[in-house]
Amino acid sequence: MPVRRSRIGAVAALCCLVAGCDVAIDGAAGISPAEQQRVDRRAEQRGAVESALKALEQAPAVVYKSTIKDASGQPAELQFRITRNGSAHGALPVDGKAVQVISADKQLYVSATPEYWKAHGLGNSDLYGTGWVRTDSSDLPVNVVEVLNPRKTASTLRTAVAGMDPLTDPVRSKLPDGTEVYDVESGLGVLRVTAAAPHRVVGFAPSLVAAAAGKTLGAEMRVEPLTGDALKKLQTELDGAVGGIGQPFDALTQVNVSVVNDKLDCADFVGTCRATIDVANTVLGGASGTPVHLTLTVDFTAQSLGAQSCTAAADAAPDTTTSMTCEVKFKLPNRNASYQVQAKPSARGEVRVPVDVNGVREKLKAEFATLGG
């Protein structure tokens, strides 16, 4: 009998222990209302970010806005518009200076100051600073046609914010116009998306899309989609920009120019001196038969008569030698006297790229038709 009572007691004690465990687990599984609100806020932010990135991904074109200081120290806004196919027109704030960019028919054209081109090691920096230059992404801090394509930008931003702390409470702020936005910090910079639907990306740190961009393109790029009339306006202005490129310099082709022969003739008793110079050019790169534009300068000096200069220009086939002439006329104080004249020639060459404006415009027309422009 004592043994049987002991077994019953043991069973009863075990049942009580199990029941006690059940009660403890039920209590631990609950979540406080405050914590549930934090979970909901984080979920709302994630949903807003993804919705905004999808809208950017599907945009036919966007405009990026940035701010620099103008010559007087006042803020100036720059705009760079680009389609999802890579056609682009506008200015970027490279190292705080405006650099003009056109992308059309898979060609990139840049207009910048001589100082910009000199910093990129181009010997024709003074010449390039006077107009448009056909080049590639190597002459920009980032490949803007690829990096700022709305589809690529959305994909890169998605990757950048994927590593953000999932337990961080969302941060909201207001733009100057009163729009409430989420400030999503990823460690590389801040992405801003509207808090209210329809959600869209309104700005981001350039370092989120390219490491080099953070150092050269400023602190933030603001973003707006382009549709309807704004998209048609981009097409119109891009058409006009292509027509204004003219024959741009070609930074993708290297030209070496040298004087290989020179002859000086001065007419007696007249004061006229003519230099005949043979100029040779050697082309490296993608000239593809495009003529080389040669510029000849000859500096004349004459005893007791001073100095004068003349210039001449010519177009030459690649890898050929061209005869060029130019002349000056000295005023002779004594027609019966003899004067010693010296001539010092120098030459430079560059390749100009012919642009089929009508052909490019037809391609742009077909592109914008598919975009809804």
Image: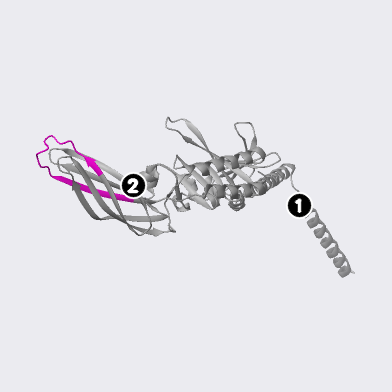
Residue 184 is one of the magenta-drawn residues:
no
* Image point (41%, 59%), residue name: 285
Coloring scheme used? one colour
Residue 332 is one of the magenta-drawn residues:
yes
Farthest residue, direction right: 1
* Image point (85%, 61%), residue name: 12
Tag count in the figure?
Answer: 2
Q: Which image quadrant for residue 21?
A: bottom right
Up the image or down, 164 lies above or below 319; here it is: above
How packed mark 1 is, by other alpha carbons closer than 10 Å (few <14, some 14-19, many 20 or more), is few
Where residue 268 sits in the image (x, y, percent)? 15, 43
Marks 1 and 2, Cα distance to the nearest angstrom?
86 Å
Where residue 259 sits in the image (x, y, percent)? 26, 54
Which stretch is magenta?
327-348
The secondary element bearing badge 1 is classed as loop
Q: Is residue 80 visible?
A: no
The secondary element bearing badge 2 is classed as strand
User: Closer to the camera, 66 or 250?
Assistant: 250
Up the image or down, 150 lies above or below 176; here it is: below
User: Closer to the camera, 177 or 239?
Assistant: 239
Where is mark 1, residue-wise? 29
User: Closer to the camera, 286 or 312?
Assistant: 312
Up the image or down, 206 lies above or below 335; here it is: below
